[in-house]
Image (cartoon, rainbow, N blue to C red):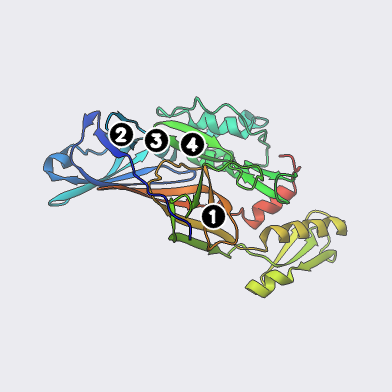
Amino acid sequence: MPLIPQVFPETLYFNVTVDGNGFPYALSAKMQHGLNGARSFTCTVAGKEGLEACRLGAIVEVNWGRGNLTNLTDDKTFIGIIKDVKPRANTSTFTAMDYTTFLAESQYVYYKAEDYIGIDLYYAAARACDYKGIDITRLVSGSGILITGNMDLFGWKTRKEFIDECFNEMKVLVNDSRHPTNTIRQWQYAIRDGKIMDFFLPDPDNTINNPSVTLSEENGNILDETLVSQIDTTRLINAITVASKDDETIYVQIEDANSQDKYGVIGKYMDYPSTDKSELENVAYKALNRFKEPTVSYTISLTNQDNLDLGEMIKIDVPSLPKGVIKTVIGYEVNFGDAITTRYQVGIPKVSFKEYIDLLKEPTNR
């Protein structure tokens, strides 16, 4: 068994302010974040004075990180607004949400097709994010996917509803030498630091990836018992019938025997707008190849590793897995107490069957 190097963590640094004032009443706290949603910060507060400082609508800023006694640095910053307060006799709690919450609770906007058709989805979503102090200065790259009239973007929506519809369309079907066949890359968004909105396009299946960190016993940053796998078979398909939408007597049926031996027979029917049997067969093979295996994600507790963020890639190399796998951080929970402990959820969920078929109907260079 390989030796695990001894780790000497640096000094932990954790500071909270409420409405710009120091907040020495925090006993413990928890921060949670997931893709396309707001970060939440839930804090346990001591005493009456602490509770009185926690008014609804107050601005909370949290800074934390690692350093040494002469060089403390903030690795992370949370800025949010208190949305919930729970008073109790001795200790109380409040929950603050980052500025993504303003997008979810915004005044409704009437989005007109004529104002958006032909615009890059990326820039349309960025425009909607420019609201209530959210910093959009990083949103400059574009996606290359233009808005069309048949996208479900228009009408009365909150800003977040419009943004979510844009990101539902921001999928890229990739077939090149660096990716498995029919790889789908999905744009995501989040405020990962302060008030700064980020749009990012994870690429964990790229064969030339450089993960942010490799988790292994050799590196001393993971224990095998803290790795919990989650297997989702709800989207698994291993027997498929594809019929012509115009003539249902024209169809193809294919199955995957290996997948059926492992998971049982799980069939799916779909219609497709073509009467060309070879085209129907091609669609069936692509769909079966995409969905014949379950979606696997992991929850990981790490030692002295609390600076990873959404969209970053992690390589997991532990004896319980047949080989090292690279996954993307899709959520995390940080607990602040006598120490800082972090649990990461990694692994991008597969798109739905309908979303995938819709992609197949579009040009593959979307």
Label 2 to label 3: alpha-carbon separation: 31 Å
**Secondary-structure class at tag 2:** strand
Tell me, for residue 317, which label it has, or none: 1
Whichever of labels 4 and 1 marks the residue nearer the N terminus, that label is 4
Furthest-top residue in view? Answer: 137
Task: Report the disc number at residue 68.
Answer: 2
Task: Residue type at mark 4: give it.
Answer: Arg
The residue pinned by badge 3 equals 99
Sequence-wise, which precedes: disc 1 or disc 2? 2
> Nearer the observer, disc 1 or disc 3?
1
> How would you rate the neighbour count of disc 2 (Cα within 10 Å): few for under 14, some for 14-19, many for 20 or more?
few
Pair 2/3: label in front: 2
**Mark 4 and mark 3: span between their CA atoms?**
12 Å
Q: Which mark is residue 159?
A: 4
Q: 366 above or below 132?
A: below
Picture residue at 60% right of the left edge, 58% below the top: 323
Q: Residue 243, position in %: x, y? A: 79, 62
Q: Is residue 361 left or right of residue 167?
A: right
Counting residues from the start of the chain, the first of labels 2 and 3 encountered is 2
